[in-house]
């Protein structure tokens, strides 16, 4: 069974991490340069502009997962009229490409496939010069026609969150989902990709460790070995609010005094409400840098005092002095209570 590779600056471990570098066979030297730069900033190296942007294109979800703050949020005032404007999106992508951004993740804590026009966001980013365009999804809304459109639009990677090996555990982790349908959809998008002779999108399945599902982790890894390109195993991050109180009974990086977080060195998040956040976890929303009005503000936020402070505190190993960072890293494990 492929081992989980968990870097000392990350909260998600991966199997088969090297598969990302294999895409250089398609994208050439620019891809290798991007991956080298990504590794450098992930090791807390400085950069004039984020190598990645995370853009939340809608603020809604079709599930009410136990480990997500959306489980207690009202869907009111989150309809299509409130969604991220495509013209603003294009201006952000163009500015980001001009300033060296190489990756775009098209979601935050939302379900991006709720948007019927989602594919055009993927297509525009790829055509504009973003090398790595990807997103996470619960997989329930994925259909064969949509999968084909995503493949043809140039999607680099899709991350499908499952968190279980049985329907019983899945239903507790992801209320409102359809376990068997999601499993079929994982197989379907890989089959459609392979049938077309495409190397992308890479297909990754995710497992968030909580006390509700940790007993299935080894089985989950064995189940998906050889069936997908990667498995992601995420340390549990206690949400800012949730429908039920849960923890993780096991942890790895989160209990190491040497842990440093790479997020402030790597990316910015722009929410559907245009709030700019310093990281992509739930707790990033508790530390907004400001509200985005123009693309140029991305550079201002990235080089501003608050981001410099976050980076310095993590470089010095003092993140626990920042309440939000302490809650994010330490708050989800019972042994850290």
Image: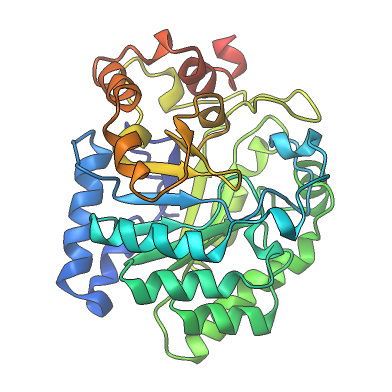
Pick whichever, 201 or 2, lies toward us: 201
Q: How is the image coloured?
A: rainbow
Q: Quadrant of residue 197?
A: bottom left
173 shown above or below 97: above
4 shown above or below 288: below
Quarter that holds the C terminus: top right
Q: Quadrant of residue 76?
A: top right
Q: Is residue 196 left or right of residue 5?
A: right
Quarter that holds the N terminus: bottom left
At x 51%, y 18%, the residue is 324
Question: Can residue 225 be seen in this snapshot?
Answer: no
Q: Quadrant of residue 10?
A: top left
Pick whichever, 279 or 164, lies toward us: 279
Q: Is residue 127 left or right of residue 142?
A: left
Residue 224 rendering spot, x and y as whole percentages: 56, 61
Question: Can residue 324 be seen in this snapshot?
Answer: yes
At x 57%, y 83%, the residue is 149
At x 47%, y 45%, the residue is 293
At x 60%, y 48%, the residue is 272
Name, please, the residue furthest toward the front: 293
């Amino acid at each position: 069974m492929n081992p989980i590779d968990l870097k000392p600056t990350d909260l998600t471990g991966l199997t088969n991490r090297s598969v990302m570098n294999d895409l250089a066979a398609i994208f050439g030297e620019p891809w290798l340069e991007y991956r080298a730069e990504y590794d450098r900033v992930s090791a807390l190296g400085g950069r004039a502009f984020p190598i990645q942007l995370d853009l939340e294109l809608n603020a809604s979800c079709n599930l009410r997962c136990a480990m997500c703050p959306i489980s207690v949020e009202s869907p009111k005032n989150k309809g299509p009229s409130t969604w991220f404007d495509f013209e603003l999106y294009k201006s952000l992508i163009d500015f980001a490409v001009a300033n060296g951004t190489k990756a775009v993740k098209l979601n935050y804590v939302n379900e991006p496939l709720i948007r019927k026009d989602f594919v055009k966001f993927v297509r525009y980013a790829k055509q504009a010069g973003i090398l790595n365009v990807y997103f996470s999804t619960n997989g329930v809304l994925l259909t064969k026609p949509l999968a084909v459109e995503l493949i043809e639009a140039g999607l680099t990677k899709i991350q499908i969150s499952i968190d279980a090996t049985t329907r019983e555990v899945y239903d507790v982790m992801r209320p409102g989902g359809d376990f068997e349908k999601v499993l079929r959809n994982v197989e379907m998008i890989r089959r459609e990709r392979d049938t077309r002779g495409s190397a992308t999108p890479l297909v990754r399945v995710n497992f968030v460790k909580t006390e509700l599902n940790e007993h299935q982790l080894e089985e989950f890894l064995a189940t998906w070995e050889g069936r997908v390109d990667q498995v992601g195993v995420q340390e549990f991050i206690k949400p800012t609010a949730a429908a039920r109180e849960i923890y993780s009974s096991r942890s790895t990086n989160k209990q190491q005094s040497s842990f440093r977080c790479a997020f402030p060195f790597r990316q910015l998040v722009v929410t559907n409400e245009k709030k700019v956040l310093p990281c992509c976890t739930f707790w990033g929303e508790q530390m907004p840098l400001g509200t985005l009005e123009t693309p140029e503000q991305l550079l201002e936020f990235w080089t501003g005092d608050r981001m410099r402070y976050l980076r310095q505190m993590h470089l010095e190993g003092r993140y626990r002095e920042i309440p939000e960072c302490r809650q994010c890293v330490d708050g989800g494990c019972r042994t850290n209570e």
